[in-house]
Image: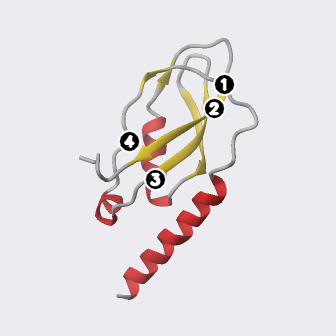
Amino acid sequence: MRRASKVIATVLVSLCLFAALAGQTASHTAERKVVEKPAPVYPELAKRMHIAGIVKLEVVVRPNGIVKTTKTVGGNPVLIQSAMDAVRKWKFEAAPEETTGIVELTFDPQQAQ
């Protein structure tokens, strides 16, 4: 019972953090078309707890279209690692220079396999 209370408290804190960070955006964004977009794996804990949400990541993409770095902007901590793992595998269209942008991944337990 005590563990369940801790999990619920963690989820509530996470949701508050997400709400606080949801309005933030990167100072420099650039639109680049995604060429390959592997879907994130829905975490087992999130499935069991029916956690849904949006994870926002700041992504730096090299000129050749490969993701250089990802940084969390907002989202539930239970979902963030899965989102980051997926976005690191994305491939973007080539561009003359490195670009930075915000991507959003939506996790919905109703659509999880």
Q: Which mark is residue 53?
A: 3
- Callouts 3 and 4 close, C-beta under 8 Å: no
Of the two numbered discs 2 and 3 on the same chain, state the one appearing first in sequence: 3
Q: Which mark is residue 101?
A: 2
Closer to viewer: mark 2 or mark 3 = 3
Q: Quadrant of the N terminus?
A: bottom left
Real-space CA distance between mark 3 and mark 4, rounded to the nearest whole angstrom: 13 Å
Tell me the residue at 67%/22% (across/down).
98
Tell me the residue at 51%/48% (across/down).
55
Q: Which mark is residue 48?
A: none
Residue type of the residue flagged with mark 1: Ala
- Residue behind mark 1: 30
> Is 42 displayed left or right of 103 in the figure?
left
Circle 4 crowding by C-alpha within 10 Å: few under 14, some 14–19, many from 20: some
| Residue 28, image x, y percentages | 74, 31
Residue type of the residue flagged with mark 3: Gly
Closer to viewer: mark 3 or mark 4 = 3
| Residue 48, image x, y percentages | 29, 64
Of the two numbered discs 1 and 2 on the same chain, state the one appearing first in sequence: 1
Residue type of the residue flagged with mark 2: Gly
Closer to viewer: mark 1 or mark 3 = 3
- Residue behind mark 4: 40
Circle 2 crowding by C-alpha within 10 Å: few under 14, some 14–19, many from 20: some
Real-space CA distance between mark 1 and mark 2, rounded to the nearest whole angstrom: 5 Å
> Is 67 displayed left or right of 78 in the figure?
right
Of the two numbered discs 2 and 4 on the same chain, state the one appearing first in sequence: 4
Residue type of the residue flagged with mark 4: Pro
Circle 3 crowding by C-alpha within 10 Å: few under 14, some 14–19, many from 20: some
Of the two numbered discs 4 and 1 on the same chain, state the one appearing first in sequence: 1
- Callouts 2 and 4 close, C-beta under 8 Å: no
| Residue 49, image x, y percentages | 33, 66
